[in-house]
Amino acid sequence: MSNLATVHPIKPLQEAREQKVAQLEDGFLRLANELLDATMSSGLPETELCILMAVWRKTYGYSKKMDWISNEQLQDMIGKHLTHCSTAKNNLVRKKVLLQEGRKVGMNTNISEWETKNNGFCKTLAKPAKKTLAEAANRPSQKLLTTKDNIQKTKENTPIPPEGDREGEQAKPEKRKAERIDFESYLMAYNDEVGEKLPHAISANDQRRRRLKKLIPQLKTPNVAGFRSYVRAFVCQAKPFYFGDNNTGWSADLDFLLRDSTLTGVREGKFADHKDPA
């Protein structure tokens, strides 16, 4: 008879995990309740919220109103690429949530100046929009029924021109109505395609309306879908420089994409990061 050995499975050793518990004794920062409430209802994107809290940590955490915080520091703090950090910080300055003096940034405690999604124009438009929709819903609708009697009365009341007046009468050409452009749809398409990579467009001012009217006929598909494809192509082609990864912190925006030269550059692939063959 052969000897059989019994093999017992060996359980892997479980590494001990150090538990981290937040304690006030390890440090804390003072923050006004109104500032926190305004931030919660601001509608800021995730990256901008992370940058905002990082600024709190570096300023209020050290009893400072402003401080110079490099993009590398922000990258280490929130775990996102420094290009996205730079773009988000510039967006917060543009929305007047952060103040900038030279290389230093700090919180704008005057909440009424913020131009965020809910604290700014969207919140002020909510009440009148709601009132207008309610009035339209409550307005009695007039039902028009086409019946045989109505058709006969219409025919009887229609005056017939004399036969002599028809001679020499020329048919007037119908005026072609200009198609109405929904500028807000183009802004929404731009904001959807750029995401958090570029500053969002808020208003369709007169200058942007004029540029859109000029740009739309030049698109391969002259409508919102064609404009969306154009913006998507730019985002895919453009180098990090156009997303704020530069010494000045400049980044492309809607006005840059409304230029004729930008559209031509996208078609010719001038914004792509071409690498020399090895």
Image: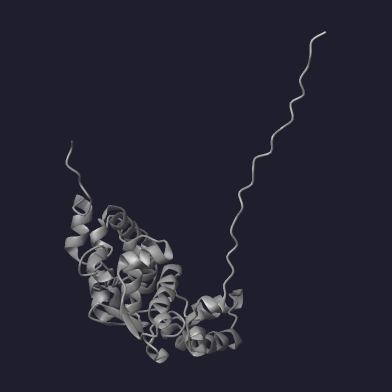
Check the picture and name the quadrant holding the C terminus.
Answer: top left
- Residue located at (18% from left, 37% from top): 277
Looking at the picture, how far across and down is residue 117, in whole percent? Answer: 44, 79
Corner quadrant of residue 105: bottom left
Looking at the picture, how far across and down is residue 59, in whole percent? Answer: 38, 81
Corner quadrant of residue 205: bottom left
- Residue located at (36% from left, 85% from top): 64
Query: Foreground: 150 or 103?
Result: 103
- State left or right for residue 177 relative to residue 123: left
Looking at the picture, how far across and down is residue 15, in whole percent? Answer: 61, 49
- State left or right for residue 33 relative to residue 210: right
Which residue, as the protein is rendered here, is positioned at the far top? 1
Does residue 20 show up? yes
Query: Foreground: 77 or 248?
Result: 77
- Residue located at (29% from left, 74% from top): 166
Which residue, as the protein is rendered here, is positioned at the far right? 1
Looking at the picture, how far across and down is residue 269, in whole percent? Answer: 21, 50
Q: How many marks?
A: 0
Does residue 197 show up? no
Note whether 76 is above or below 10 in the view shown: below
Query: Foreground: 8 or 152?
Result: 8
Note whether 24 is above or below 173 in the view shown: below
Q: How is the image coloured?
A: one colour
- State left or right for residue 222 relative to residue 150: left
- Residue located at (32% from left, 68% from top): 87
Check the picture and name the quadrant holding the N terminus.
Answer: top right
